[in-house]
Amino acid sequence: MFQHRYKFLWIAFLATYSFLNIIVLEGDRLFQAGLPYNYLFWTILCLSFSVWMSNWLISKFLIQHFKKIHPLIKQFGSSVIFTFLISLLSVEITDLLIGDPFTYTRQNFLLTFAFTFRINLFLNTINAIFFFNRKYKEKELEAEKLKNINIGSQYERLNHQLNPHFLFNNLNALSTLMHDDVEKADIFLHKLSAIYRYISKNVNEELVSLEKELNFLNDYISLLEIRFKNSLLIEISLDKELSKLFIPPVVLQLLIENVVKHNFFTEEKPVKVKIENNGKYLKIINSIQPKTQDVDSMGIGLQNISERYRFLGETIKITETEKHFEVIIPLIEIR
């Protein structure tokens, strides 16, 4: 507060207020006798300036020492000593310049010291308000930073769950293909390698363009076609202008994988999945043919998607009927 860029205006305001308080309200005098107004104003101005600047010197050069003592206690304690010296010097100077009855006496000194002490107390009170307000804002900013760090770490942890989960499922499928069809296994391996590069490159991104995500999804669907042939039917019908909007990476793949995980399907009884849009929302609908045994979700899938959208300030909508399972996810517009 004492290093405020408008400190000289503060000093002028404080001196003027103190002067008017003595004149208009007949406040406490500086001496046993009343000073002429011209002397009184300049004396008050010099005292106000001296008290402020002594506090400025303390805050700039002395406050950094004795770190175990609270800075406000150091500031006020040191300023009282300076105030005492300023009052003593003021009375001595008045004695030299004006003389009797403004000579140095115990009563004149106590009156001057009482005046400068009140000014100093007022300034230190305002300084304490400035101090605690600044500390509050610093703590508020620190709390916000910690919150962002925590959110970022949670988001990163969610994203890193995708890598091992995706790889685990497809390596199992590759292992099966190698026994049944080596040629298809080779094609599958090359596509899997390309897809995994995409995941590794984009999994730490908050958002990717829908166009980019759809290109990845088409590659992933081609893997599913190798694995399941015509038992899993996926139809994508989206407006072209949506391609420039954004979506968290690998979300669509997770939704399709969720369908695969929780349903049984054959060529005679396939599961149908449709991806369409309703404005700037994607709707993923699949027919339900639930597996008879329990499926361990491993904490991935819908919960992961829901949490990632929550970090973006958005929500997803899940609807389940006897015949269909529907997930609606928002597309993100970056301006």
Image (cartoon, helix red, strand yellow):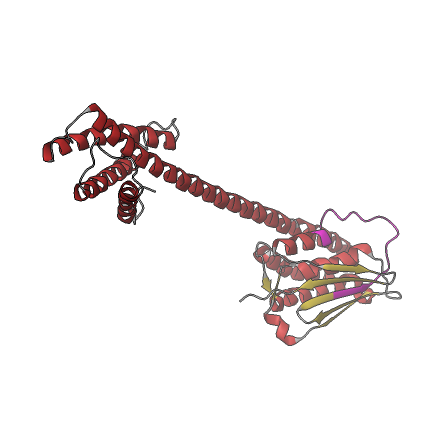
Q: Position of residue 80 (x, y in %)?
A: 30, 29
Q: Position of residue 296 (x, y in %)?
A: 78, 47
Q: Is residue 134 left or right of residue 93?
A: right
- Residue interval drawn in magenta: 284-303
Look at the image and tell me whether residue 301 can be seen. Answer: no
Q: Nearer the viewer, residue 79 or 100?
A: 100
Looking at the rendered image, the quarter that the N terminus falls into is top left
In magenta segment, residue 113 = no
Q: Nearer the viewer, residue 156 or 18?
A: 18
Look at the image and tell me whether residue 235 can be seen. Answer: yes
Q: Quadrant of residue 305?
A: bottom right
Q: Nearer the viewer, residue 286 or 183?
A: 286
Q: Residue furthest top?
A: 106
Q: Quadrant of residue 329?
A: bottom right
Q: Position of residue 288 (x, y in %)?
A: 85, 61
Q: Is residue 81 left or right of residue 188?
A: left
What residue is shown at x 23% (from left), y 34% (from top)? 30
Q: Nearer the viewer, residue 83 or 206?
A: 83
Give the answer, above or below, for where 38 lies relative to 70: below
Task: Please count the marks in the image.
Answer: 0
Q: Residue furthest bottom?
A: 240
What residue is shown at x 29% (from left), y 39% (from top)? 26
- Magenta: predominant secondary structure element? loop
Q: Position of residue 81 (x, y in %)?
A: 27, 27
Q: Quadrant of residue 112?
A: top left
